[in-house]
Amino acid sequence: VRDVGVVASRSPGAARGLEAWLEASRHRFGLDPAAGPLSCLYLTPRFRASASVIVLVTAGRDAAPRLVVKLPRHRDQDAGLAREAAGLGAAAERGLDRDGSAPRLVTHEQPAALGGWPVLVETALRGPALRPAVVRRRPEAAITAVDSWLQRLAGGAERRPGEERVARLLTGPLEPLAAIGAPERALVDRTLAVCRPLEAAVLPEVLEHGDLSHPNLIALGGGRGGAVDWELAESRGLPLQDLAFFLAYVAGATRRARTPDDHEAAVRAVEAETTRRLRRHATAVGVPEALVAPLVAASW
């Protein structure tokens, strides 16, 4: 079955399980007791690679989530939550939790009340998701909001030679692919050759979100954007990575791409305009235009 929905109702009486733990932690988590009893809506993303169950926590009759809880599908799969906690910590260091463009980490622990099961609690971002239909209606507004946000992130970043990041973020992760066979080795070698100019370049050490597309983008109003799901964040990343990924999402959304071939055709159809946007962004964050192509190759 492609999609499975589960609906559950809470029996009258005392809260149990996660709800009981949250009720007991209301003061610690900043939840006003006067807001009413807590309710939990459990979401299980349909794609197989998802390692987490997501819980939206509401209070009383207010339908807007107060908190978001993440639980691993298996007790021993805490690595994803730990990485998200680190990503939210890096976002907080840059003030993204204060301006509301990223959730604030509330806690990451293994409470005894939940049998030692790992749990991550973060604040909820309120606003409509930048779904493909929303992007189709106002693509320029979406691009401007995300581009401005990424420029602000890169603006205060320290600048360092790219050699260590190329080794850590490209060469190392690509080695298992290269080991598959001769065609893969040739492809990896070609990719690394294209990206080699990044090693000697002094580049901003930016915070990468790592998955800047639907359903992780939120419209905050006033031309501002925010992002949730920081599980793939990289605190010492390369510039242009998130923007290249996001512009590919916009291309697919505006052309209603469904298959991998559709997405490739959509990206190629707007290649000239995408290149212009990436060059403008590179100039704004102090990256030489000649490095745009290697950075886009690194993104893919």
Image (spheres, rainbow, N blue to C red):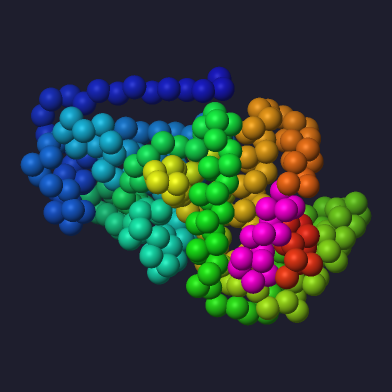
- The answer to which image quadrant residue 84 occupies is bottom left
Q: Which residues are magenta?
A: 274-287
**Residue located 39% across and 43% down the image:** 221
**Residue located 72% across and 29% down the image:** 259
* Left or right for 82, reference 276: left
Above-or-below relation of 4 to 44: above
Of residues 108 and 227, the one drawn nearer to the viewer in this rendering = 227
Q: Is residue 50 visible?
A: no
Q: Quadrant of the N terminus?
A: top right
* Left or right for 27, reference 209: left
* Left or right for 71, reference 31: right
Residue 282: x and y, percent?
Answer: 67, 64
**Residue located 35% across and 58% down the image:** 99
Residue 250: x and y, percent?
Answer: 63, 40
* Left or right for 198, reference 216: right
**Residue located 72% across and 53% down the image:** 276
- The answer to which image quadrant residue 189 occupies is bottom right
Above-or-below relation of 150 to 59: below
Magenta segment includes 279? yes
